[in-house]
Image (cartoon, coloured by chain):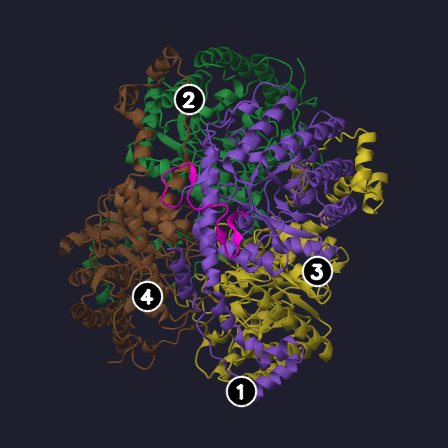
Chain colours: A purple, B yellow, C green, D brown
């Protein structure tokens, strides 16, 4: 079998002082932090699409990558070369999980029948690869946005036949995810939204989208899939507006259709920032709503208005994100999936290692910092103290429904209330965080 | 009584060809459009705060306006001068409605008791002014964000005494709104949100906020107020993040606490754009969710990242917004309230007329265009046709729950589905709209 | 010859009341406005790239367009089919100009020699097409950003051989533009900029870029090209940062290298808004700096952070833009080139007509409105009046250098200066503009 | 004399492990880094305006701070209390520099004569305070944007009397800066720009602005001021558009009027990000243009569209900024001036210490990291290597003018150029930076 990556041995942990760019400096898989290994905490995964399907093209230019596994064979043969490359990479990176869209790994074929046949054949290849390498499936999903038939949406398409086509892919991908031991199944509504309200019926499309989510839930239970169903919010791109804009919007949508207990969210850093929120906000919101599922780890560019999917490299940002996750109890079925792409100029196959090693080390360093934040109760004690009044008489009465507006007015007048503000101490808290970071 | 505005007679409609800057060219109150007068459709209101309280200051500079009603008297005397100026303006503008925050019209006083006393006195003044001029109250609200006691929120404040203080104001303002014949009561959570997650307990604050909304609902029913309770979404400013970010977020929040039938939304154009949506999107979303209540008519600046509250002046934009409103059945208790401020350099009191006349004419012209769009079914026929498949067999079966993912897969394979995309025709639809506009 | 567009006769002007979607309602080529025909004022052009090269792909999905001229032939044969389609379209649209990048029309080939050979052959084809149809070349340019060799820039590439390759293309394209009677030559530095400062030497790259501009100037003079050299500003995309960020930045760059008299700017609406300016601002700035050259007519989406290149459809916006252009004396060699793309869902070839007809009508309607603004001196009189003080003694003395800070201080103290602000009257001016628009 | 800050001794350096929130952990003034002390490298300054003038108001609410030095006296008495508080703070913080706008420290008075008189009196107070405490003046400036007379600009005002008034202030402030030993004089054109193009003459206003800059240069030379004149770019806020948008725009403006050797830029982090650039970009651009002067150290909020002026707290960001400064030779007359404001909820006077200690420690930690980056040539070696081709024959010939486009074309064809792209290695470089950070 061809070797696609010029690396004799898997990437090793060598410690913070190592100068070897192909070693981990912080990610030490079996190091125990707050009672669990780093591997258990972080549950890293690599993606199929950006790493093994994308050739480096962008809207203004052709592919730059010239990958060996993209050349010389039928679609099915190339799919197998791609699987070879992918699992060689996963192994050498020592990353425990991966994720894929159906047609990342499976040639779409020229008909729906071919799609189904190809899927069956490639599912076996993937199963074997998983077994050989020990790499596990974090989540599967169906790509119902790239083919031109989905240009006007999949579930929300004006044509019910497109809905049926998408249902076929989702059915196939969910069942395969189940059989491959996948721990989650993701739905991202990339074209579920609109380009212009002039040709769009919002109410109709929401009904259609909800119906598809309902069907996914029913299928999950029918086949006995125990993993988590995840929705991945994104505000726009490729559409002008997606229905799953951000976590709070997804929550409202699910509540409208009584689906809020069946789905959690897969939060992507770059989607969060495109929606006008910080990544930390999206995670904290999901945790507070009981909807936190998994993470698409990456970063955007604050000066650019599209999804750049860069590798996370800010320990400062990630420490606070992991702090929120740890406060919420940590991952269950989810993990940190690197939905990251190399810069188009990073054309060397070894750049795939640099990108992932950097991302894994960033998150590992951040985990260690977050653990200290949690253990030292640096923030939590002060926060608890700030709201302490709500555990005293007036606060308890208000929250337990013993007051009306009028009784509060009477209370206020009787007690001549004139509450004195107390400093929010933001700068001091920021310094406390920095004390742990540096 | 002093005359504050140098204008002998109220503003008149003079028709599109008029060159008189102090006349309406499109707003003809009693002109009938689609079976209702313009006045009934548009339900215009002017605001108290920007027009009569603000002195033209901004973060970088002092007030520029030098208003006669801001000078020479005790707080209570000035409040009465302000009411004189306001109702003189409403009358001369011939605008049917107005809106106010409690402390726009009522001196806050030095204690909660003074606040209550001042309120009682000024309520009578306002009642008399309403009667004298025929101006009606579109909505009332309480300002629970300007006083320093609310710096960390009102309902979501860490101190329950602040909650009680806010409850006092809301209780007073809602009861007064009821007695003054107000048609709606608005809640805007200007400081209900956070500056930093480091000192914030999201779950706790959401509980507090929901509790306040619940109390408002109970009070409404207790006092027999028949108007609509409205929440006004805004994403940020003054806080970094508000809980009522946009319409979809408000919907989710209300659903979480079972309040979705008790509130509608008051959508502001400039808040919409700050939240990453078009104004039309926010209105269409509210209509599709059954939550459309009222409008804060203004515009933002696409190059600026804060709330500029400029007067609406785009017939192109407003025609599509009014089209959405008309499709949804039009206003019931709501209306177009000009939550607009003069530019800081527009220091002449007559500029208040120029701003409002421009806004009213823009919306009146837009109403006429929107009516044509609706009557000619310019868009609606094509939209209906686009989704027609959902009224046929496959579509009906899917939506009515007769299909599972697996049965759809079988259907797709049997029928060898290969749906062909049809043009979304966005450019043609845009041209059709422009044909009506120009 | 195949007919690619199902249209028997060219598009006709039918007047504002026409309901024919394939007719002009405002663009009446020979109608005289302010002493020139609409055709002479507007100088419309269509582009080769979005209309005839792009297949409807985006970053998230494959091509949707399925164009007849993209199928069944060698690159050279397809290039000829494409030229057939393009010039059939230009003729039927009755658009006087077109523009192209070298490799839009000319197969790039597998070597630099093939590129040169192909260019020679296709140049003749284009010359013949121009002659047959009467369509003229507004501007030519070289695409030195799509091929992977340009991934790190063309002129600013770290490898001087890439510079030489780009120079070859620019040399060929400029000479061909000259021979084809092109009226301008455009340089757009799509990849002249950086992705990360970590691997970038700003000073070095600026030197390289300036050198290429200098070479272009020398070549122009050597071959006797009388057209205008244009730089097209854009802030980012595909790079993170381009050196030609906006008009003011381009001006500074040219001044640094003494090139400010050799170039003008080609301003694109959507690039303007991505750079944080209004389109009107960029045009007014270019006019005020004596750098106004040509326009890439399109529009962006205020909610999206990338270049959407939609067809212009706002008469409101375009009336003010054309007003600035008319005030500056109108186009000389430039024109309104539609650098516009169909939405990816607008897959019908006839949508190309809908898009362009809409754009042309929007600009024609805007021209008529702008002419009225100019003729009635609606704005100009008030602006002149506003600055009138600068034509009086103190103003003249200051500007002519007769005062120092100290003499002004003496003057201010002696005259006890206390200047009184006068209203900026923004709302009234906006109303005056709207009076002409509606 | 009243003690405003409850602190017995000045802030001390206690080292990274210190848990004392009122100690420095990284800023050790006399520690030597790259041959200079930290104090010499960083040249920290505190500002007068946010710290001692602002009372915590924002557009939506009143002041929250309740400072002792804002109460109980005539304007002149309060100005002296404010000076007491300011210099007590500077001393206890051990910050070597401060900066002020004229009217931060000097009561504006009710006439221009009073302004001049007050200035003379307060200049002595400041001189004495400087002497007593050893605090030096980093820069002075004149506030010609807050008073309502400047609402339409100072130098660019339509009224030349306003120009003269501003000239008086600039003359006074520049002379006072000179006498107080100030090391720089700053011009920020807060209202030099426009709100709407409808009432603006861009060309006229640019002439006026240039005239004022010219007058400032002449005055500087006349009085023998040896400090640096600095322009502070900002894109907008309070205006819609400022003429000094960003560094590149300022450069072009200065070149147009031949002033490029007389001014440098004072770059503010938050202004950089509002203009669509990273802070690092603005610094690197200024260095590459030879225009780097000084820094207004703060940070914005990536989710908010206005100037939040928060304290810098990202070592990650600041390490790269300081790296650019060190590469450019470091500060000469400039320094890191904290143009920072407390959050409105941070109402405790001690929060002023927390904010500044955090900022100083962040920059000190960043300096240590940047020094390592520079010493290890982590980035510079690879960058030099990347552009090495430009020191070889073809590169040298191109840059030295020995090639034309045609000769390069001949060269390319003869050598059958087919340059092969090399990885830009962004991810690896990011990892190298992180290796030094963590």
Q: Which mark is residue A416?
A: 1
* Residue B102, horizontal then vertical, whole percent: 57, 76
- Main SS of residues in magenta: loop
* Residue B272, horizontal then vertical, whole percent: 59, 55
Looking at the rendered image, the disc whose residue lies closer to the viewer, 4 or 2, is: 2
Which residue is rendered at x = 30% and y = 58% of the image?
Answer: D26
Q: Nearer the viewer, residue B26 or A161?
A: A161
| Image quarter of residue C363 | top right
Is residue D315 covered in magenta? no
Q: Which residue appears farthest toward the bottom when viewing the image?
A: A414
Query: How many numbered circles does the render carry?
Result: 4
Are discs 1 and 3 both within one chain? no
Q: CA distance from mark 1 to mark 3?
A: 38 Å
* Residue D217, horizontal then vertical, whole percent: 21, 51
| Image quarter of residue D323 | top left
Which residue bears the numbered disc 2? Answer: D420
Are discs 4 and 2 both within one chain? yes
Q: CA distance from mark 4 to mark 2?
A: 55 Å
Question: Range of the magenta residues?
Answer: A15-39
Asked if marks 4 and 2 touch (Cβ < 8 Å), the reply is no
Asked if marks 4 and 3 touch (Cβ < 8 Å), the reply is no
Looking at the rendered image, the disc whose residue lies closer to the viewer, 1 or 3, is: 1
């Amino acid at each position: 079998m061809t070797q696609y990556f010029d690396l004799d041995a898997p990437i090793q942990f060598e410690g913070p002082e190592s100068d070897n760019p192909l070693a981990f400096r912080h990610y030490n898989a079996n190091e125990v932090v707050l009672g669990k290994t780093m591997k258990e905490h972080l549950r890293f995964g690599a993606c199929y699409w950006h790493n093994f399907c994308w050739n480096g093209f962008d809207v203004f230019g052709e592919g730059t990558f010239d990958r060996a596994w993209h050349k010389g064979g039928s679609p099915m043969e190339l799919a197998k070369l791609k699987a070879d490359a992918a699992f060689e990479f996963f192994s050498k990176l020592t990353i425990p999980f991966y994720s894929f869209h159906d047609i990342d790994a499976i040639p779409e074929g020229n008909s729906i029948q071919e799609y189904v046949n190809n899927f069956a054949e490639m599912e076996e290849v993937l199963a074997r690869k998983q077994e050989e390498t020990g790499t596990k499936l974090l989540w599967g999903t169906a790509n119902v946005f790239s083919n031109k038939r989905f240009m006007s949406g999949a579930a929300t398409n004006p044509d019910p036949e497109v809905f049926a086509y998408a249902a076929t892919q989702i059915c196939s991908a969910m069942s395969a995810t189940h059989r491959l031991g996948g721990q989650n199944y993701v739905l991202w509504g990339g074209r579920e939204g609109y380009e212009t309200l002039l040709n769009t019926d919002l109410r109709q499309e929401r009904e259609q989208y909800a119906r598809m989510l309902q069907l996914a839930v029913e299928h999950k239970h029918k086949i006995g899939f125990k993993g988590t169903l995840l929705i991945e919010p994104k505000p726009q791109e490729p559409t002008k507006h997606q229905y799953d804009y951000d976590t709070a919007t997804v929550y409202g949508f699910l509540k409208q259709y009584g689906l809020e207990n069946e789905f959690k969210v897969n939060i992507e850093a770059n989607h969060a920032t495109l929606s006008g929120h910080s990544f930390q906000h999206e995670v904290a919101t999901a945790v507070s709503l009981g909807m936190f599922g998994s993470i698409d780890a990456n970063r955007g560019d604050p000066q650019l208005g599209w999804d750049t999917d860069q590798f996370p490299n800010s320990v400062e940002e990630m420490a606070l994100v992991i702090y929120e996750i740890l406060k919420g109890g940590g991952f269950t079925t989810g993990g940190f999936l690197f939905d990251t792409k190399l810069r188009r100029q990073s054309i060397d196959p070894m750049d795939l290692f640099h990108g992932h090693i950097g991302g894994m080390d960033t998150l590992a360093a951040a985990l260690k910092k977050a653990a200290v934040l949690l253990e030292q109760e640096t923030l939590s004690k002060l926060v608890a103290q700030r709201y302490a009044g709500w555990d005293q008489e007036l606060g308890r009465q208000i929250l337990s429904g013993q007051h009306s507006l009028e009784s509060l007015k009477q209370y206020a007048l009787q007690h001549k209330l004139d509450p004195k503000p107390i400093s929010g101490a933001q700068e001091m808290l920021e310094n406390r965080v920095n004390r742990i970071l540096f």
